Every structure is written in structure tokens, then in C-alpha cells.
Amino acid sequence: MDDFVGQLKRQYVDFSTCLFREGFLDDQFLQLQKLQDETNPDFAFQVISIFFDESEKLFDNLSIALQQPVVDFKRVDSHVHQFKGSSSSIGAQRVKNLCDPFRKLCEDKNVEGCLQQMKHEYYLVKNKLETLSRMEQQIREASAPPPSSSRLL
């Protein structure tokens, strides 16, 4: 059992190291993880789950704003600014990094393709963070002591 847990932990470290190396995550993600403890071992992924929910709403709002006959670029910029802040707060570096070019395109009133690129990066990081969460859950489950068996006398 210890070998299995050790293997899971190595896979987790390798995968998370890869996410940092490829620029998906930055140090803010580590800061978020440091806020976890035994009483709330899922804290980071609870915050990330909120980010996912809010991001879906932001994408809907962006899509609606961009489909208007007269696009309110200040509103679009506001949504992108909010998205940048929330992605920055969880350490989603590649998503955050796309927000500045998108905001520049808003200033120039040219957003063709940018929303799709942001969605693509967002869904990439979402998939990777969900995988990381599942790996962390597997480690916790495999590390948990077996339930005690009580004998009936």
C-alpha cells in the first residue's frame, strides 16, 4: 500500500511540475495550496471550482456582449479584466497572460478570434486542474487508514 501511495505522489509531483514548466500555473497556485490543512484538505480545489463556475458565466457574458449590433467595448474590457483577476488569483498563468492582449484588442475595437483563444486556454487549464484534483483525491483515499472492523460478540 505504501508503494502505491508513493507512486501516486510521484505522479502528482511530476504532473504538477509539468504544469508549472509549461506555464499553465504560477506561484499563486502554490500559495493557494498552502492555505489547505487537515480540516479543509480540498480548499484549493474548492476555490478553483468557484473560478470555473464564475468563468463560465464570464464567457457567457462576453459572448453576449460581443454579439451585440453595437459592441460595448468598455463592458467587454470589464469582463476580461474580471477574468484576468480571477485567473490570476488561482495561478492560471497562461489564461491570465491572454487577457492583456485581449484587452488591447478591445481598446482597438478588434476582438476577432481572441475569445476563442481565451476559451481554448481556459478549457486546457480546467482539464489539467481537474486531473490534478483527481490525483490529489486518489492520494488522500489511498493514504486513509482502513475503516476499523468491529466484531460482534
Image (cartoon, helix red, strand yellow):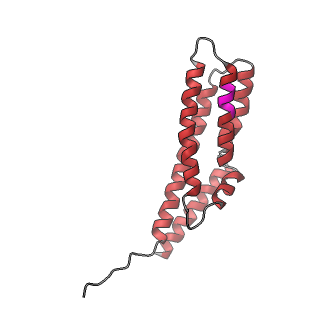
Q: Position of residue 93 (x, y in %)?
A: 68, 44
Residue found at x 55% / y 42%: 52
Q: Is residue 137 magenta?
A: no
Which of the 4 quarters of the picture holds residue 106?
A: top right
- Find the residue positioned furthest to the left: 153
Q: Which residues are magenta?
A: 76-81
Task: Give above or below for 109 relative to 49.
Answer: above
Nearest the viewer among 72 and 9 is: 72
Q: Quadrant of the N terminus?
A: bottom left
- Find the residue positioned furthest to the top: 69
Residue found at x 60% / y 20%: 66
Which of the 4 quarters of the picture holds residue 31?
A: bottom right
Secondary structure of the magenta portion, mostly?
helix
Which of the 4 quarters of the picture holds residue 126?
A: top right
Q: Position of residue 131 (x, y in %)?
A: 51, 52
Residue found at x 58% / y 32%: 58
Nearest the viewer among 2 and 103 is: 103
Q: Is residue 77 magenta?
A: yes
Q: Position of residue 69 (x, y in %)?
A: 59, 11
